Amino acid sequence: MFDLNSIIVILTIPATAVMAASAAIQAVRFDFDLFGATFLAVITAVGGGTIRDILIGATPVFWLRDITFLITAVPVGIITYFIVARMQGGQGQRFRLLSYFDAVGLALFTLVGVKVAINAGISPVMAAILGGITGVGGGMLRDVLCGVTPTILKSDFYATLSLIGAALYLFSVPYLGEEISLASSFALITVVRIAIVARNAT
Amino acid sequence: MFDLNSIIVILTIPATAVMAASAAIQAVRFDFDLFGATFLAVITAVGGGTIRDILIGATPVFWLRDITFLITAVPVGIITYFIVARMQGGQGQRFRLLSYFDAVGLALFTLVGVKVAINAGISPVMAAILGGITGVGGGMLRDVLCGVTPTILKSDFYATLSLIGAALYLFSVPYLGEEISLASSFALITVVRIAIVARNAT
Amino acid sequence: MFDLNSIIVILTIPATAVMAASAAIQAVRFDFDLFGATFLAVITAVGGGTIRDILIGATPVFWLRDITFLITAVPVGIITYFIVARMQGGQGQRFRLLSYFDAVGLALFTLVGVKVAINAGISPVMAAILGGITGVGGGMLRDVLCGVTPTILKSDFYATLSLIGAALYLFSVPYLGEEISLASSFALITVVRIAIVARNAT
C-alpha cells in the first residue's frame, strides 16, 4: 500500500510533533521562555534520528535533507508552549501529559529508527538497537539539556521497552505484514509505557 | 580581496580564541583547576564547528585537519584562566566578561558556520540554521559540561539572534558584498547580545 | 606476534568491560535500577570509541560493525551492578572501586584510540589527541548523564595523563616495539591515576 520511504515519512512527522510537544511541556515545567522552549522542541524532536544518522554515517542528517521536520517541530513547540503555560492543575497534570506524549514519541521513533536502519542495510539485531536509540535519543538530549537525569536511566523498562517493541516489529513483519506489525509494536510500547507511568503516579 | 577559505580561517581563529576565553572564565567561576579549564576551553572553542561538521558529514572534523585551532585554544584558555583567577571584583564582573566574550564568539562562529555550509553546497535556509548551530554549539557544550542549563534555553533571543544574524548576512551579501555584510551581521549580533546582557544585569 | 587489528580487539574487549563495570558502580551510587545501569554501562563502554569514530568519519561506528562490544558490555554491567549493590562499606569503598576501574579503562581506551587513529591514517599528534578522546569520552558521557561534573574537568591530570600516555606509546614504539610500548604506557597511566586517587582519598 505504501512504499518504504512514505511509511518512514508518515511515521516521522507525528513522531516529530509529539516529541516537540513533550519538550515544550518540559520547557514550561522548567520556566523557559518561548525561545528556549522552541529550541528545546527542535533538539528533542530531531535528536534521536540525528544520533542514529550520525552513528550509521547517513550525513547530511535527515532534517538537513528535508526541511519538513523543522517546519513541523517549530510551530508544534510554540503552540504547545502557549497551551501548557495557560493550563490549570500544576506539575502533576503537566508531568502526566509529558509522559503520554513521550510514550507515543518513543513508540513512533523506535519504529522509524528500525525502518531507516533496515533501509540502510543494517542487520536486524543492530536495526533493533538503532530503533531504540532513535526512540530514546531525543528525550535523553531534552533531559540532559534541562539538567535532569534522563528517564532512560532512572525509569524501569524505558529503553528496554523500545528494544522489545523494535524486536516485535522485526519478528512479526514477515508473518503479519507491514501495517499490522507496525500497529502491534506501536500499541505494545505506548500501552505498557502509559501503564507504567499511571502505576507510578498512584 | 580574500578568497572564501581565507575569510573562513580569518574569522575562525579569533572566534576560537574568544570562545576558549569564555570557557576559561566559566572554569574559574566553577573552581576548575588549570587542566579542567584547558579542556573546557578546547571543547568550547571547537564544539560548535564540530557539531556542524558531524551533521553535514565533513569528517575528519575541521580541527583534526588543521592543528591551528587547537594551538589557538590551548594557550588562550591557559592565559585567560590565570588572568581571570587573579581578577578582583568577584562573580558579577566575571559573568559580564564571560557574556562579552560569548557575544563575540556567537557572532563570529555564526558567520563561520554559514560560510562553511554554503561552501559545502548546503541551501541558504539550512546554511543559516547551521550558522546558528555553529554559533551556539560550543557555549551549549560548555554549559552542559559545567552542569548549567545552557544560555540558549533560558535566555531570550540567543539562538534566535544567531539565526537572524545569519539570515541578514545571506540576504545582504549579493547587494553589499562580502566585507560589509560580514561586518553588519557581526555588529548586529554582538551589539544586541551585549545590550540584552547589560539590561538584564541592571 | 599479533597483527594490528587483533591487538586493537584484544585491548578493546577488556577496556569495554572495565568501563561497563565503572558505569554500573556509578549507577549503584546514584540508585539507578538494573535497566538504567545496563544502559549507562553500554553508553560508557562504547562512548569514547563512538566519539572518536564520529570525529574521524569511521561510520557505521565500531560497535555497529561488530556486536562483540555490546555482548561484552551488557553482562559485565549487569553482573557488576548486582555485586556492587550487595557490597558493604558504602560510598567510600564504591568510589575507590569506581576510580580503579576508571583508571584501567582510561589507559586501555587511550591506547586503543591511538592505534585506531594511526590505522586510519591520522597523523601522530592528532592520533595522541584521539587516544585521549577515546580514553576520556566514555567516562565523560557517564558523568554528564548522571548530572555530575565530569572528572576530566575537575580532577588534575586526567585528560593530560591520557595524552601523555598516548605520546609515550607513540615515541617508544619505534625503539621498544609494540608489546613493551603498550605495557609501559598502560602502566604509566594506571599507576599515576591510581596514585592520584589514593592521595586525594586520604
Image: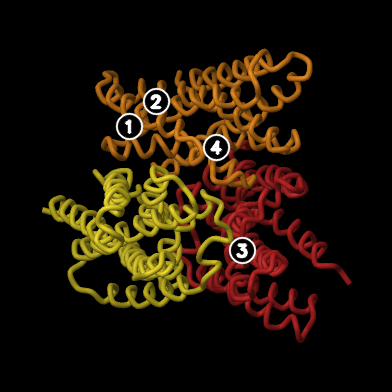
Chain colours: A yellow, B red, C orange
User: Which residue is the extreme one toward the front?
Assistant: A175
Query: Disc 3 is attached to a residue of which chain?
Result: B
Quarter of the rendering containing residue A27: bottom left
Name the amino acid type tagged 2.
Phe
Q: Are marks 3 and 1 in contact (CB under 8 Å)?
A: no
Residue at image position (40%, 57%) is A115
Calculate the distance from the C-alpha at mark 3 to the C-alpha at mark 1: 37 Å
Judging by the rendered image, the residue that carries numbered circle 2 is: C95
How dense is the environment of label 3, judged by Cα within 10 Å: few (below 14), some, or many (20 and up)?
many
Which residue is under mark 4? Answer: C49
Q: Name the residue under label 3.
A: B135
Q: Nearer the viewer, mark 4 or mark 3?
A: 4
Give the alpha-carbon distance from disc 1 to disc 2, as whole Å.
8 Å
Percent position of residue C83, x then y: 29, 21
Give the amino acid type for the residue marked by disc 3 in the picture.
Gly
Q: Which of marks 2 and 4 is nearer the N terminus?
A: 4
Q: Which of C170 and A90 is in front in this view?
A: C170
Q: Earlier in the sequence, mark 4 or mark 1?
A: 1
Instruction: Examine the image and state in which quarter residue B79 appears.
Output: top right
Mark 2 vs mark 4: tell me if same chain.
Answer: yes
Where is residue A3 shown, x and y percent of the image? Answer: 40, 67
Q: Are marks 1 and 2 in contact (CB under 8 Å)?
A: yes
Q: How many marks?
A: 4
Q: What element carries label 3?
A: helix
Quadrant containing the N terminus of chain A in the rendered view: bottom left
Q: What residue type is labelled 1?
A: Arg
Would residue A190 appear left or right of C163 to someone viewing this image?
Answer: left
Chain letter for the residue marked with disc 1 in the picture: C
Looking at the image, is mark 4 or mark 1 nearer the viewer? 4
Q: Which of C177 and A156 is in front in this view?
A: C177
